[in-house]
Amino acid sequence: MPQWGLDNRGKEYKKGRCLLDLFREARRMLNARNLLQSNVGKKVVMAVTGLILVAFVIGHVAGNLLVFAGPSALNGYSHFLKSSNEVLWAVRLVLLTAVLLHIGSAYGLTVAANAARPIGYGRKEPQAATWASRTIRYGGVLLLLFIVFHLLHFTAGVIQPAPFSETDVYRNVVGSFTVPWVVAIYLVAMVALGMHLYHGAWAAFRTLSLRSPSTTPMKRTIATGVAFVVWLGFTSIPLAVLAGLVR
Ligand code: HEM
């Protein structure tokens, strides 16, 4: 009995048992448009882009902690990052693409979930839901607003709670975090980031099958560790400045 499959352009073709069919099937599955159109594809895109952003955030918190080593350490690090315009813009492009794909697939999955169940569950007893997982979309929107604020604040110098210098990043950080409303914004955003990482990193590991479904689905050692360390690292900076420990 011949079997029929769909090729890359959606045309039917007769399946045999040859390598060419396997190749066609693999190409169909890996086709970028097909990948983004399926829910599994969107989840994979979310997971991969999420992990890219987690890697950036870990590097960023490590770099920022140099504020505790003094002005020359932090400013030296900042100058090093900006020493090659090509590399700087390549990294920015990767981050921007990752953020856009991450948001795009989150939006697509939300629309698909709402379409699949226009009337909500009468009674919901999820297997492994936490407050972090239930609020992840709102937290994501909050983080997006924070990132826009943050770029206007420290990168572009458009929002200036304290005098801004293109070259003295240390002064920008210390000057800004002596202003209580700025500290408040950062503290709230870091809680949102911690919760986003707590649920997001765990979900990414599960999507990519780096963490198999377990009999204790609430156990999330790696995700909890990453979220806690990143939250603590970032939060310590505004608090240390506000307390006068870094000046
Ligand atoms: C206490 C927390 C944070 C501090 C003190 C901080 C500090 C900074 C500073 C000083 C810059 C400018 C660097 C330079 O001009 O050399 C910067 C850039 C940036 N930060 Fe943060 N940051 C914090 C949290 C975050 C978080 C949570 C994110 C993302 C979720 C983030 C994403 C970025 C991005 C995307 C840039 C732009 C990098 C570029 O120039 O391309 N930051 N941050």
Image (cartoon, helix red, strand yellow):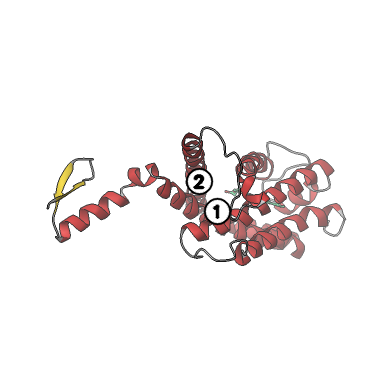
Left or right: 72 as drawn, with respect to 37:
right
Q: Residue furthest top?
A: 118
What type is the residue that disc 2 sits on?
Answer: His
The residue at which mark 1 appears reads as 53
Q: Is mark 1 within 8 Å of ligand 1?
A: yes
What type is the residue that disc 1 sits on?
Answer: Leu
The residue at which mark 2 appears reads as 102
Q: Could you tell me residue 179's position as x and y percent?
A: 83, 44
Left or right: 121 as drawn, with respect to 109:
right
**124 shown above or below 77:** above
Name the quadrant containing residue 165. Answer: top right
The one of 196 and 59 positioned closer to us in this rendering: 196
The one of 203 and 90 positioned closer to us in this rendering: 203
State yes or no: discs 2 and 1 in contact (Cβ < 8 Å): yes
Taking the spot 58% from the left edge, 62% from the top edge, the residue there is 217
Q: How far is the residue under mark 2 from the one under mark 1?
A: 9 Å
Q: Could you tell me residue 172's position as x and y percent?
A: 74, 48
The one of 132 and 190 positioned closer to us in this rendering: 132
Taking the spot 75% from the left edge, 43% from the top edge, the residue there is 185
Mark 2 Cα within 10 Å, few/some/many (few <14, many 20+)? many
